[in-house]
Image (cartoon, helix red, strand yellow):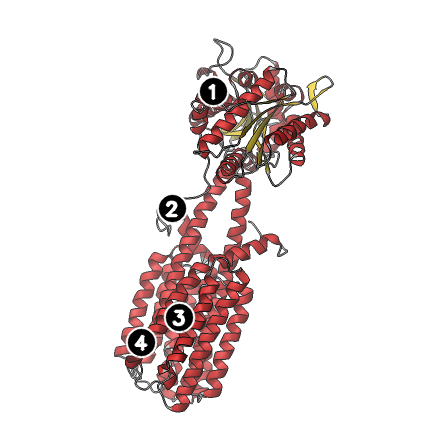
């Protein structure tokens, strides 16, 4: 599980900036809705009010009321507005509207005019819950706004039982969803951190910690597309690296490559340079905007510095050296992808001239190879991996894995919401009779509804969100329980029980309805449920509630709040689906070799570290596979052909592994690995020999006529007490025994200390 860093460091600051920026679109939509709502209320004032306060008719006041807060909100939505200012301006604009509404409401009460329903300023203040305001800012903002609203209400309007309950319901509307807001921000930050780390993994070479081929492909095309020009490229190749591996072993070769990677990165570290490991013993450096002669001189210095490291090469006292090919492009390309292929192919050709001329030198290409060269088309046939995801189903409604993950992330919020509803119901049942001096009939009826309908519904929803066996149906159960709570509230409001409308005001079912939009219920279920319940509340309120007096103005903020919550819920699920799909893509890229498409060293390390399941008596073995004489192949045909050869071998091994069965990995360079299981050690060894034989039988052309490309392999069976990773060194030793005894064969390592072998 990925945990957030303990300190609120630079990474956290970046997330908060992104989080606030992601709310700009929602702020803009809320701004439009608020402006349209105010304009409609002012235009329709003869219909909505029998006798409104004179201020509502005043053009100057109305203009200021409409324009000033709206203008502040517009500024908060602008892309150039810094995130802290964006948040502060939006909160200030909402405060202006809330205070204006409350002032008009109190003046109307004192002057005997039609009042503005308290639900309208509550709706405006509740808009802060859906516009991506950081939780540490949202809580004090809501507290200040709610306190302002409550103080104005309590000090300027005579207190009644209904107004007390309204204030309590307003608190529920504000503060019950606050827990969900915290969870949403927390989950968003965890997902953001995970995505950044997965993105780093997918573009980082596991061995050297340098950017990998995937990152290089993207960076070169970006440099050629966005500039600055010229763009120069140097490809460095470690000389006679195969000799080093054969003499000193793969572990020593890996240490050498890691040291070379660090040396190159330290030598060319700068804002205009980019360093990567392509594969095997190949490295690349890109300069963007630097003079080609300066870049060429730096490339030659970097190449020469490798000899000064005095790394052992396996050839007497000769240190490791490198050859390099250099090319540059100064004119803006019409097709950046093709220009990248031309530049890379030109530098690669120059590298092989350096190899041919004696190694340990740099050759700079005088001109680029022709655009029609076959190597250019060959490079273009290998597409650049894209991290972006095209999602045909924006809400992920047909992706069971996503829906399960999305539903699971809302379980805590559902428990919190329902626990809050249950506590509020208990508090009302305990306090209301004494506070409101309710008659016994009203107390008895309300407690029956509370005790036999609303509280049990809340408890059932909490159990469904907690008990694992009920989780597949938890969302449906939650919707049904919310409907039961609202039904109980509306039954009390519609009944002829005295004072029922005082203990269950119009705000209370509205608060419960809106809670559906903040608990991550799939949109396809949540949307029709909210619409049906919304219509049900309106119908019951208009047709059955005795206290209803045709005050249509009270319904407009309910409609606004419902629409805002539904829209925010849609955006949340859409963003969650895109993030989930992108995370899945990044997870796969981080564990996939960009050349062959096989699982890479990182995936191999994870799989080999796993231990057999309890009761598994089968044999598990690791096979280290190495392509024979690939260096000679590369020297004869070039690295592009060598990449094609590796790709062919990967295909052959993958097809053969389906019949074995086995899982194939590419560790880097010409190294592959396989994990094979079977009933006995001899069965596993026979299956490994099938992999070796399959490569020879594929008849991949080699530099020696009549001799196809082959592989050598070493196999080690893991003891029951060890993981495959600990058997890897024995498999590596067996591989080099296969190399020493003639290649194109499998050597089986001796049993481990505990005596791995035939377990039949």
Q: If you read the primary sequence from the N terminus, does the residue marked by circle 1 or circle 3 appear first?
A: 3
Q: Which mark is residue 43?
A: 4
- At a point 42% along the width and 51% down the height, the residue shown is 577
Mark 3 / mark 2, whichever is N-terminal:
2
CA distance for labels 4 and 1: 83 Å
Position of 244 with respect to 329 (left or right) is right
* Residue bearing the label numbered 3: 512
Q: Secondary structure at mark 4?
A: helix
Residue 433 visible to an observer of this rendering: yes
How far apart are the alpha carbons under marks 3 and 2? 33 Å
Please identify the residue farthest to the top as the structure is shown. Answer: 706
Q: Nearer the viewer, mark 4 or mark 3?
A: 4
Residue under numbered circle 1: 690
The quadrant holding residue 414 is: bottom left
Query: What is the CA distance from the residue labelled 4 to the residue labelled 2?
Result: 42 Å
Q: 227 above or below 455? A: above
Q: Nearer the viewer, residue 42 or 734?
A: 42
Q: Is residue 458 above or below residue 8?
A: below
Answer with mark 4 or mark 2, whichever residue precedes in sequence: 4
Q: For marks 4 and 3, give the CA distance.
A: 31 Å
Q: Residue at x 29, y 81 (%)?
A: 46
């Amino acid at each position: 599980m990925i945990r957030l860093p303990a300190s609120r460091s630079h990474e956290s600051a970046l997330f908060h900036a992104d989080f606030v920026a992601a709310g700009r679109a929602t702020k803009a939509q809320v701004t439009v809705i608020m402006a349209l709502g105010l304009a409609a209320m002012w235009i329709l004032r003869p219909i909505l009010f029998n006798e409104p306060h004179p201020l509502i008719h005043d053009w100057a006041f109305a203009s200021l009321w409409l324009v000033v807060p709206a203008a502040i909100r517009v500024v908060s939505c602008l892309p150039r507005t810094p995130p802290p200012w964006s948040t502060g301006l939006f909160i200030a604009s909402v405060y202006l509207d809330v205070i204006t509404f409350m002032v008009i409401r109190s003046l109307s009460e004192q002057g005997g005019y039609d009042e503005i329903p308290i639900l309208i300023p509550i709706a405006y203040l509740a808009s802060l819950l859906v516009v991506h305001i950081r939780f540490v800012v949202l809580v004090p903002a809501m507290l200040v706004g709610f306190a302002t609203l409550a103080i104005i209400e309590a000090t300027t309007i005579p207190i009644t039982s209904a107004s007390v309950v309204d204030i309590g319901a307003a608190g529920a509307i504000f503060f019950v969803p606050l827990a969900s807001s915290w969870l949403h921000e927390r989950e968003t930050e965890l997902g953001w951190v995970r995505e950044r780390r997965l993105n780093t993994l997918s573009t980082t070479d596991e061995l050297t910690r340098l950017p990998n081929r995937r990152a290089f492909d993207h960076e070169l095309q970006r440099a050629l597309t966005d500039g600055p020009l010229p763009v120069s490229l140097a490809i460095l190749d470690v000389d006679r690296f195969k000799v080093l591996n054969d003499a000193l072993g793969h572990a020593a070769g890996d240490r050498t490559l890691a040291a070379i990677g660090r040396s190159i990165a330290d030598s060319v570290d700068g804002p205009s340079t980019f360093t990567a490991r392509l594969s095997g013993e190949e490295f690349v450096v890109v300069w963007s905007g630097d003079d080609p002669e300066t870049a060429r001189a730096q490339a030659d210095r970097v190449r020469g510095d490798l000899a000064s490291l005095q790394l052992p090469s396996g050839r007497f006292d000769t240190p490791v050296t490198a050859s390099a090919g250099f090319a540059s492009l100064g004119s803006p390309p019409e097709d950046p992808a093709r220009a990248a292929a031309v530049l890379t192919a030109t530098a690669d050709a120059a590298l092989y001239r350096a190899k041919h001329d004696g190694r340990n030198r740099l050759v700079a290409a005088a001109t680029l190879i022709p655009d029609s060269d076959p190597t250019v088309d060959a490079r273009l046939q290998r597409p650049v991996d894209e991290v972006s995801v095209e999602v045909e189903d924006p809400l992920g409604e047909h992706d069971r894995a996503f829906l399960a993950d999305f539903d699971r992330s809302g379980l805590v919020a559902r428990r919190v919401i329902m626990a809050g509803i249950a506590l509020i119901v208990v508090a009302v049942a305990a306090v209301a009779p004494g506070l409101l001096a309710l008659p016994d009939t009203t107390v008895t009826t309300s407690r029956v509804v509370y005790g036999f309908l609303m509280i049990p519904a809340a408890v059932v929803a909490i159990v469904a969100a907690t008990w694992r066996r009920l989780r597949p149906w938890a969302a449906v159960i939650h919707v049904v329980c919310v409907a039961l709570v609202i039904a109980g509230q509306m039954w009390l409001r519609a009944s002829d029980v005295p004072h029922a409308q005082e203990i269950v005001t119009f705000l209370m079912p509205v608060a419960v309805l809106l809670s559906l939009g903040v608990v991550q219920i799939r949109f396809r279920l949540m949307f029709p449920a909210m619409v049906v319940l919304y219509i049900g509340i309106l119908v019951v309120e208009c047709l059955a509630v005795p206290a209803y007096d045709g005050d249509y103005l009270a319904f407009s903020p309910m409609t606004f709040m419902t629409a805002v919550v539904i829209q925010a819920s849609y955006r949340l699920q859409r963003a969650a689906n895109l993030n989930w799909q992108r995370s899945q893509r990044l997870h796969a890229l981080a564990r996939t070799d960009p050349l062959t498409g096989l699982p890479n060293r990182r995936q191999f390390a994870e799989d080999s570290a796993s231990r057999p399941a309890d009761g598994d008596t089968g044999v598990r073995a690791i096979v280290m596979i190495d392509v024979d004489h690939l260096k000679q192949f590369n020297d004869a045909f070039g690295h592009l052909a060598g990449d094609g050869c590796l790709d062919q071998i990967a295909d052959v091994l993958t097809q053969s592994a389906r019949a074995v069965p086995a899982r194939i990995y590419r560790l880097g360079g010409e190294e592959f690995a396989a994990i094979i299981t079977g009933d006995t050690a001899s069965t596993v060894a026979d299956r490994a020999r099938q992999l070796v034989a399959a490569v020879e039988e594929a008849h991949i052309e080699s530099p020696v006529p009549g001799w196809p490309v082959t592989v050598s392999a070493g196999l080690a069976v893991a003891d029951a007490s060890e993981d495959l990773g600990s058997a890897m060194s024995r498999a590596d030793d067996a591989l080099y025994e296969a190399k020493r005894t003639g290649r194109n064969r499998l050597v089986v390592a001796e049993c481990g200390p505990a005596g791995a072998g035939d377990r039949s």
